[in-house]
Image (spheres, coloured by chain):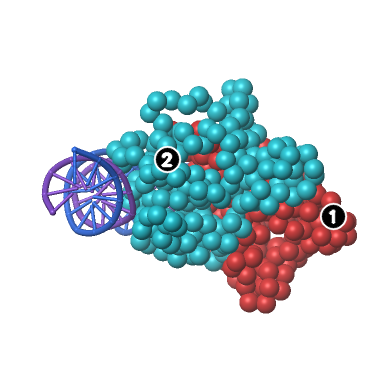
Chain colours: A cyan, B red, C blue, D purple
Amino acid sequence: MTLPRDYRRQTCALSRSMEIVGERWTLLVLRDAFYGVRRFGEFAAHLAVPRAVLTDRLATLVEAGVLARRPETGTGRREVYVLAPKGIALWPAVRALTAWGEEFYAAEGGPRRVFRHVGDEAPIDPEGQCTGCGTAVPVGDVLVTPGPGLPPPAEGDDPVTAALARPHRLLTPLLTTAPQGRTTRGSHA
Amino acid sequence: MTLPRDYRRQTCALSRSMEIVGERWTLLVLRDAFYGVRRFGEFAAHLAVPRAVLTDRLATLVEAGVLARRPETGTGRREVYVLAPKGIALWPAVRALTAWGEEFYAAEGGPRRVFRHVGDEAPIDPEGQCTGCGTAVPVGDVLVTPGPGLPPPAEGDDPVTAALARPHRLLTPLLTTAPQGRTTRGSHA
DNA sequence: CGAATCAGTTCGGTCACCGAACTGTTTTCG
DNA sequence: CGAAAACAGTTCGGTGACCGAACTGATTCG
């Protein structure tokens, strides 16, 4: 595990952020963590990231206090990675970048996923306001729902992709059963 | 110039964004563009990025429609890089990441820079709302002001750094006079 | 004209990333 | 219990991106 690459001689706060979350794959790992992905194999299968890189990113994020590594609650004795408060504070950034991608690289037919307010199910705008009730939606009250641009579920989908085809609340565990074998390739995210 | 690295098999909108703005230095280039940096040499001196990498990033962003390359208005016949509407739409993402860095990696004494609403000069919160009047501040009405955590101006500062020690409105040209020689190292951002 | 400025390009060295195979432990199941 | 699968990483060789420094050619200035 290496230290994050430094943007030397920079005093702007954005450079500090980029040292933590600016490396390849890091923001995709955090997005999955918001979606409720928690275990090493789930991240690996869903993202199709080289496992060594995933190891490095998770360790860096844990060391930075963005993620926490802790024993799985309930049954298992396995370790899981969950967002710490410092990681949850990145939600506006993840939402803004996702919204930008939806706006300028929309799929045929419309957005791939829509973030909705869990109360009234109205979509959330790129700034985080509920378009129904007008309030700022806290991250725990965000529902991820499939949009018209989402590809239909396929046979070879990994369990994370399959689970994300159904509405799901952010920060709640996505899978209860164990994911399958490690040779499956990640497919859709 | 190479194509942006692909996050294969990903259908999430965030992956599309990361293919454009997820490469090293890219978001720092865009931040400088919001600050009013426009010329190749200004970016190079302020960021201390390898010039070949800067060439690649600017070309990628122009090709993607995030920046526009066009002749300098008024006097010069030189080319400048300015934000296109698609680039301006990235402001919420840049603001959110900058705010996160200020929150968790603040300098001694406080924030390095504060974004304010040009009307009432009240600070803008991480979600883009003016803490004074409560409205969402459009990017053109944002004032960047030095904060208590900003290092004092030094002798060797490049012109961009020096100019950013004074309040400045986003998207307006930062420098009117020509920047100095290319051997100066970037210092502070 | 001669010197300085400027926007890139070229180049060799180093390091991060990649994919695939492998290791050791834990869990599942006959 | 014992075998087999699942799981969380580690190891490894190859490739490409990034790095700093020097260089090029066009434009501008004195």
How crowded is the residue under tag 2: few (<14 C-alpha within 10 Å), some, or many (20+)? Answer: many
Residue depicted at 72% across the width and 43% down the height? A119
Instruction: List the single residue furthest toward the bottom.
Output: B109
How crowded is the residue under tag 1: few (<14 C-alpha within 10 Å), some, or many (20+)? Answer: few
In the image shown, does B27 or A77 lie closer to the viewer? A77
Q: Position of residue B163 (x, y in %)?
A: 71, 63
Residue B189: quarter of image: bottom right
Residue D10 as seen in the image, left or right of residue A142: left
Residue B58 as seen in the image, left or right of residue B2: right
In the displayed structure, would residue A182 be above or below residue B35?
A: above
Return the chain for callout 1: B
**Residue linked to disc 2:** A46
Q: Position of residue B77 (x, y in %)?
A: 68, 41
Residue B21: quarter of image: top right
Q: Position of residue C29 (x, y in %)?
A: 25, 40
Q: Is residue B54 visible?
A: no
Return the chain for callout 2: A
**Residue linked to disc 1:** B134
Residue A155: quarter of image: top left
Residue depicted at 49% across the width and 65% down the height? A64
Residue depicted at 46% across the width and 44% down the height? A175
Secondary structure beneath dot 1 equals loop
Q: Disc 1 vs disc 2: which is toward the camera? A: 2
In the displayed structure, would residue A165 be above or below residue A28?
A: above
Residue A29 as seen in the image, left or right of residue A136: left
User: What amino acid is at disc 1?
Assistant: Gly
